[in-house]
Image: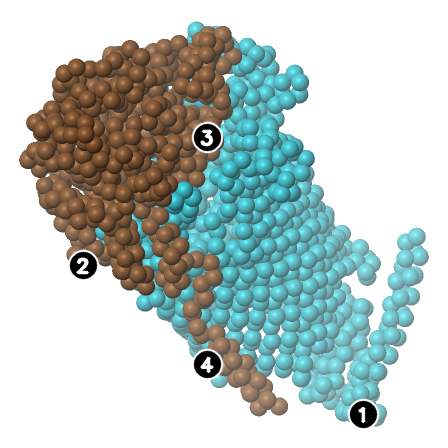
Amino acid sequence: MKQIYHRFINGLSHHSRQWIMLLCAIVFSVSPALSQTGRTIRGTVTDEKNQPLPGVSVLVAGTNTGVMTDVNGAYSLSVTGNIVTLKFSFIGYLPKDVKVGADNTVNVSLLPDARQLKDVVVIGYGTSSKKDVTGAITSVKAEEFNAGVLTTPAELLQGKVAGLNITKSGDPNKQPATILRGPSTLREGAAQQPFYVIDGVPGASIDLLAPADIESIDVLKDASSTAIYGSRAANGVIIVTTRRSRAGQTRLTYSAYGAMEKVSKSIDMLTADELRKYLADNGVAPLAKPLDDDGSNTNWQQLAQKTSYSQNHNLSYSGAGNNAEYGASVNYFKNDGILKNTSLERTIFKGYINQRFFNDKLKLGITITNSGTKSDDIVQSQVLSGILFYLPTVSPFNPDGSYKENFARTGSGTLNPLSLIDNNFIKTDNNKTLINGFASVDILKGLKFTLNGSTQKDQNNVNTYFNSKSGLAVGLGGVANRTAYKSTSDVVEAFLNYDREFGLHSVKLLGGYSYQQDRTNDGFGVQTQGFSNDNLTFNNLFLSNPSNLAQIKFDPNYISTLRLISYYGRVQYQYNDKYLFQASLREDGSSAFGINQRHGYFPAASVGWRIISEKFMEKLPVISDLKLRAGYGVSGNSLGFDAFTAQLIYGIPPGGGKFLNNGVITNPIGPVRNDNPDLKWESTATTNIGLDFGLFNNRLTGSVDYYIKKTSDLIYTYQVSTTQYFYPLLTANVGKIKNSGIEVVLNAIPVKSKSFTWRTSFNVSHNKNVVESLSNATFAVNNIQSAQLGGKGQSGNYSQVIQPGYAIGTYYLWHYLGKNANGVSTYQKADGSTTAAQPLTTDQRITGNAQPKFVYGWSNSFNYKSFDFNFLVRGVYGNQILNATLASLNNPADSKFQNIPRFTLGESFKDINGYLISDRFLESGSYLRLDNATLGYTIRPNVKAIKNIRLYLSGNNIFVITKYRGVDPEINIGGLTPGIDNKDFYPKTRTFSVGVTASF
Amino acid sequence: MKKIFILCASIAVLAGAYSCTKLDVPVESQYVKSNFPVTDADYNALLGTIYSNLSSNYAVPYWRMQELSTDEAILPARDGNFDDGGQYRQLHYHTWTFDHPNVITIWQWGFGGVNTCNRIISLINASPSTEAKKASTIAEVRAMRALYNYFMMDLYGNIPLITEFPVATQPATQTRAKAYEYIESELKSVVQLLPAKTSANATLTYGRPTKAMAFALLEKMYLNAQVYTGTAKYTEAVAMADSVLKNTNYSLDAKYRDIFLPNNGPQINETIFAIPYDQQIPGNQFTRFGFFYYLVQAYGFNVGLSIAMSTTPEFYNRFNLAGDARTKTWLAGPQFAPDGNGGFTSQPVYYPGTTTQIVIEPKLTLVPGKPMDLGNTIASQSEGVRSMKYYPDPTIIQATRLNGNDVPVFRLADVMMMKAEAILRGAAATSVNGELQTPDVLINKIRARAGAPAVAGIDLAGLLDERAREFSWEAWRRNDLIRFGQYEVEYPLPNDVLTMNKDVNRRLFPIPAQEIKLNPNLVQNPGY
């Protein structure tokens, strides 16, 4: 079999050689410069390992004559003249010019261009080599990405980028919270997330990305780097570059993995027998039979969870010829959640074709990406607390098979969790298409014009059905809710680059224009109820029977169109490879802001000194690289805005109440938003000082960055006097937040031999967040209370406070003073005395906060012959988590209608205050996690058709070391209420996967 | 060749820049200054904001300030639940602060309403409507503004008088007497422009200001003038009552119960001004807070309710007249299934899953350890007399727990009893439509309708108790008790560790601290 195969391949290559020669003959016969009296030069091009290199461009200098090497790296070329120079070039390798005399055989070996592969940094509207960068930019290449069941760019980077704090639960449908260099806004959601640029398209959706298609991710951290993106860049910019074909290469890659996920930890609740015994031991009457105790022993957490299986397949191919490059990929991803009825299924198709014209002076290209996502979700807010609180003594089902419910039961576990899972579902069907075209023209030497146009369409359909058995819609005969919204984003970018070197001077200029229009929420949503049966779910609303108008609801969403028009420019100058200077300015105009403040200017400047290039450094050979960077810049935050934020709007006043107008119930229409003609962007000024170094011939490299990030004009919705304003709330710019911190990165190659290499990289970052002010002359608040967690008897209480002098996520809690002689929890009152009764809200005090002192990651990769082994350890240190879940569960007296955790067995039954949310439940959130370990084996068969096949085994979240008593300390750090675990944490998972990557 | 490229590039840049430099985005989906208000319907919808605002907070937060601060209603905690930051017990013990949620909400509600009226007046003045139409619409808006100002004056006493929108300078606090004078003059100047209720316009005028509404409000002001200004105006109160009573389109309805049923509306003859509620007009949650949870199935609906609010035993003791239909508005003692017509069958109602009949005890026995807390056992849940005066609305749903019962603000019975009280306080009895109306004549009409025995020689103390029976949970108890000097009478509950703050300054609520911060011309009331 093997022999036949070899013969076939050999035969093929023999024939194909002839074919290529014939093809060359045809191609070059049209060239008038070809002389019949010339000679033919032949040879083979190989790489540093002496393997043949196909697709290398071989060009006769000063002519248009050239060929590509074939699959065996061989070429043959007709030339005229006695002495010619042949130019060999291949992307990823250093080009080589070879002067050819009389020889007709020229064999060449090309060396890989390490710098070109590893050291290109994408800086926005251009690239730079790492040595020339003056800002704080971290570039992560595909081979360094995290492995596992991951969907978003942030997850690929978790633990790899200093200053980037990412938290993610096990929920397949929830994107991770990503906070770069500390929170710097009082707005939640998109306003806190970094700005994504995908292949030059600003604001493109990350759902369009299949991780396997990503070539590299660049994280722009300081304002001197991000200010070129102006008003959307204050949270940093993440630039994603997808894989492209390289000249002369054809590539077919298949990669896939299958994974098994399990809940990594559950909360240790009592079993039914333990609960029965606990009640009996404490003299409580047995639970009512069979209503609350039917003899069952139900583990609700286990019942709601499952072992999930996920898979990803990616098939991509690409090619590049003399004038064109093309490629396509398809990616299928299915991620089942570990809670029943939660899953994500995504298919991404992508294709591109780029073509060069007029001697490569004009380049045109188009890329089309389509991403379809189907999600299943459950009513998590109910299920996640229900599986803890619900009595274990009850069976999920009645003897007749129906779901067993006792709606009259009080306490926190009142609805059968399994029924909640099975009888309420939320299905999302999302489809996104991005069409991105570009044209670039080389106008003069060094002067290039680029025109990018893109359009992104997003169709989002969310359908919800609470069926007739649902405890959330009792007696309503099924409640169906359908929403369908289309959003579009159109972007045009036009810019000129001018790159020239004049002796020791190197200049790069950029000037550009950008237009973006985002139109969101074009669609509608409607809810109705009352179906004959549940068989059609939400699919035929016409068959519903609402009994009055109040049972039909329309979504209040409206079309919101935002326009952003910008001009920008950048100057980069360097002298003698030593002194680097960069300055940029962007002017943004946005329709979101007040009529007086629609335009903003975002300047930035930075300098760099490549000390290593100085003469005196030659005396210190141990130092192989040294560069000092410093930059200052201003960027803005206009993310997450509604188009009408600054305008007077008439609408249905809050509460949605109607009025009686001559016997007819009618909508009233009045002002629902004040206009603020002076509303403008939040602006963030960052100072960044950094040092890059390399030692021992760059076996040890690293960098240190120190930054101060001051955000001013914070946007918050303030209460205003109704004597002067239409509406009691006004969105205005008030307040300041400061983040300052230090980031350290160390990379080393401790061992490097022919067969064994060990690379290691460690990063750690420290950030200090402080709210400096919430008031100005017009608007003033002492503090903003946040985090209303509910909980028994605490429904009006806030557990966090945003207050000048403190960080966002500062806890504001009762102070626990231990138990008194009766075993009752006691607390400190504001006057310092001790109380065994529930304290008042005025007894709360500031205590601790959710911001970590350090976030770190340590990654390692080992290569031994064909084996590779990688592992990543990451963690945070010094943050606090409010374990409100445990507080709520810790209620001995309520064990007669809800379950309690094992923790409560150590409490006195008489403790009537044990469940109060206090600093007793403020716990260390520090953790160290073995986040990933991967063992791979690469087969390089001695077959031309197969480049390599890599097989790997991978484990995620293998162990975590923490003192935290909850499910997992990786609690959401985003939003205005970070670090709170309040019966809503989708459990973290432990994953084992098997994967393969094959290149042909 | 190069030139062509430069040309192409320049054209592209210019074309892009020229066509795309305008930031203004056409408004497609919102009413903004440029497209609203335009039509008659727009102006109607604008007026609607006055009424939707009124209904939004009248029957819960406004009601709580007027009722939970008296013996008529109490919302005790249940083993920590319903403590809600202490807001209900602060009302009970008169220990509220300027941060009390109701104090803040109702200030914003009332002055929001005043500002809404001012804003609409300026829009109507600028509208192309006829002068006659403008005049009648503005009269309606000014009457509503007077009502909002009255609510604010009654609660907070010294208030800013805001007469235009927008104000040039932040309005300063005026004395209560000044505010009284202003409201009086406003009502007097618009009353003749308001419609009178006829047999034909009951639906059109329902829930809108009429002549009778203005007269009734003036009567209320005159009856309380001694409290509001220090000068009594009882004769004027009687005159205002007579202006209403002359209109025979108002009459006492035969069944007391009907006034408060879920389907009440323009067909109720004695309603002078009511706030309409519906499943689509939210704000009435009497069943959610004041009904008894374990009775829901017996009353034909299946919604989880709060377990908290009741009346006090002392207040319930006033319902002691034989045959009085008004006693049936309370849920007390052993519970039987309703017969659907205001009576009961002999079918007992049991606690779910048991054969134990539900018995509601009037007593409220506090459990030590937590402030004003009854505990949360079945037995303690059954303590406290609940109300079904605003009879449960069968269309209630779990998500909103709303009642559709309209809530009367002024009704004929009040006009009559205020007249009786004014006469008892010194005004002369007058004849209306040929009938001499002495206090006994007026009170006995009300007693007769309720099926209660007639009185002879009613005195002020008897009248206050009669008002308690007739207007329980209608948001007038605080007003009545202050007028009778009994707002500070305390009825301690068993195991009560907290005591009432009897400072008479508490007859006025404080100005919310945040409002003073926003408007430094406001002055805090004495004692806060």
For disc 2, the chain is B
* Residue B229 makes an appearance in the image: yes
Measured Cα–Cα span from mark 2 to mark 1: 92 Å
The residue lying at 61 percent from left, 42 percent from top is A541
Give the chain letter for brown: B
Residue at numbered disc 2: B168
User: Circle 1 sits in a helix, a strand or a loop, which is it?
Assistant: loop
Measured Cα–Cα span from mark 4 to mark 1: 42 Å
On the picture, is A61 further left or further right than B78? right
Q: Which mark is residue A35?
A: 1
Measured Cα–Cα span from mark 3 to mark 2: 46 Å
Residue A798 position within the rendered picture, expressed as x and y whole percent measured from the top left: 34, 36
Mark closer to the chain start, 4 or 1: 1
Q: Colour of chain A?
A: cyan
Q: Quadrant of the C terminus of chain B?
A: top left
For disc 3, the chain is B
Residue A588's quadrant in the figure? bottom left
Q: Amino acid at mark 3?
A: Ile
Which mark lies nearer to you, 2 or 1? 2
User: Circle 4 sits in a helix, a strand or a loop, which is it?
Assistant: strand
Q: Quadrant of the N terminus of chain B?
A: bottom right
For disc 1, the chain is A
Residue at numbered disc 3: B396
On the picture, is A294 further left or further right than A917? right
- Would you call the spot at circle 2 few (<14 residues within 10 Å), some (14-19), or many (20 or more)? few
For disc 4, the chain is A
Residue at numbered disc 4: A505
Measured Cα–Cα span from mark 4 to mark 2: 62 Å
Q: Nearer the viewer, residue B265 or B480?
A: B265
Measured Cα–Cα span from mark 4 to mark 3: 79 Å
- Would you call the spot at circle 3 few (<14 residues within 10 Å), some (14-19), or many (20 or more)? many
Residue A92 position within the rendered picture, expressed as x and y whole percent measured from the top left: 65, 68
